[in-house]
Amino acid sequence: MNKVYLDNAKLKVGVMNRGVAWLDTGTFDSLSDASEFVRVIEKRQSQKIGCIEEVAYRMGFIDHKQLMKLADYYSKSGYGHYLKKLKR
């Protein structure tokens, strides 16, 4: 096993908070499982996972007008429809 980070005192370990999921995607089966997990969570919660436009909007990096411009760019997909429905 490669111990470069450990040997150079650069290894950092932490406990993940509740609601955080680690998804190993090193094999075809685990990638398929991760994909299904994301699909189910997004469907049940009606929220996208990893939507950088939503994060930028909610953190004030872009305004509503800029968000709508991005939503228009993706308007032919469910992603664009999701962005159009976002509210602060």
Image (spheres, rainbow, N blue to C red):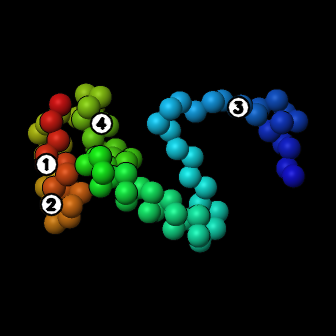
Question: Which mark sits nearer the N-terminus, 4 or 1?
Answer: 4
- Name the residue rendered at 86%, 44% in the picture: 3
**Which quarter of the figure has residue 24?**
bottom right
Tell which residue pokes out farthest to the bottom in this image. Answer: 28
Residue type indicated by callout 2: Ser
Q: Disc 4 and disc 1: Cα gap in Å?
A: 14 Å
Question: Which mark sits nearer the N-terminus, 1 or 3?
Answer: 3
Q: Which residue is mark 1?
A: 84
Residue 56 image label: 4
Circle 3 SS class:
loop
Residue type indicated by callout 3: Val
Residue 75 image label: 2
Residue type indicated by callout 4: Ala
Q: Disc 4 and disc 3: Cα gap in Å?
A: 28 Å
Circle 4 SS class:
helix
Query: Is residue 62 at all visible to an observer of this figure?
Result: yes
Residue 13 image label: 3
Q: Disc 4 and disc 2: Cα gap in Å?
A: 18 Å
Residue in front for this viewpoint, 49 or 73 = 49
Question: Which mark sits nearer the N-terminus, 4 or 2?
Answer: 4
Compared to residue 44, the image places residue 60 above or below, namely: above
Q: Disc 1 and disc 3: Cα gap in Å?
A: 38 Å
Question: Which mark sits nearer the N-terminus, 2 or 3?
Answer: 3
